[in-house]
Amino acid sequence: MIGKAGIKTLVVAFTTLIVAVPPGWAADAQEIAAQAVLETIKAVRTVYSKQIIEQVKKAGVKPSEKWQSDDHAVMLNAQFVKAIGAEIKGFELGLVGLQPIYKSNTPKTPAETDALKKLAANPGQPILTFADGNQVKGLAADFAVTKGCADCHNAHPDSPKKDWKQGDLMGAVIVRFNK
């Protein structure tokens, strides 16, 4: 069974895969770094969702928003991404959406809102990078990769949308690099 220490170890291990791009690097280098970070996080989240979560469920452990107070629970997929982001010091990593459960996941700027709308209009475009003021940002489309993702959002009392389905674009993983 994966306990709290095991989850922390996973977060630290995955975080070591990510290298911060120093401020002052050329914007194109930051865009390439944003794409690499986003591809890595998408892969990590997919593995967590499809393999780790599904495996621990077989052992009677459930994903839960309140996992820290339940010895038979692990963090939700979104919490996992946010935990990785909290371990990173060189840039921001988080989640953003047009219909988020938590206000902290709303776009910070009009450019982020526009980028999310572009992803929604063309979900086949998995990553979008752009300059926004003093930052280079990247968004990776974040889909409900399992039925459990959609079900969890639909059941959450604070969810503004209640008809999510597996495969729906739920928002994006975002990276923000200072120029």
Image: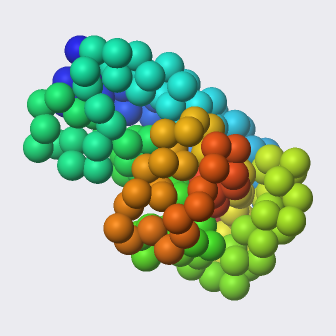
Residue lying farthest to the bottom in this orientation: 110
Is residue 124 positioned above or below 163 on the image?
above
- Left or right, residue 143 beside residue 147: right
Q: Nearer the viewer, residue 28 or 168?
A: 168
User: From where the camera sits, is residue 25 visible?
Assistant: no
Q: State the image quarter where residue 55 is shown.
A: top left
Q: How many circles with numbers are drawn on the protein?
A: 0
> Looking at the rendering, in which quadrant would you find the C terminus?
bottom right
Q: Residue at x 34, y 15 (%)?
A: 58
Q: Residue at x 73, y 68 (%)?
A: 116
Which of the colour schemes (rainbow, by chain, secondary structure, one colour) is used? rainbow
Q: Residue at x 43, y 76 (%)?
A: 103
Q: Residue at x 57, y 36 (%)?
A: 146
> Looking at the rendering, in which quadrant would you find the N terminus?
top left
Q: State the image quarter where residue 56 is shown.
A: top left
- Left or right, residue 90 beside residue 64: right
Q: Position of residue 65 (x, y in %)?
A: 29, 50
Q: Position of residue 174 (x, y in %)?
A: 61, 57
User: From where the camera sits, is residue 127 visible?
Assistant: yes
- Left or right, residue 45 beside residue 11: right
Q: Position of residue 5 (x, y in %)?
A: 19, 26
Q: Nearer the viewer, residue 145 or 19?
A: 145
Is residue 4 positioned above or below 153 on the image?
above
- Left or right, residue 77 beside residue 117: left
Q: Position of residue 94 (x, y in %)?
A: 51, 56
Is residue 171 positioned above or below 83 on the image?
below
Is residue 44 positioned above or below 59 on the image?
below
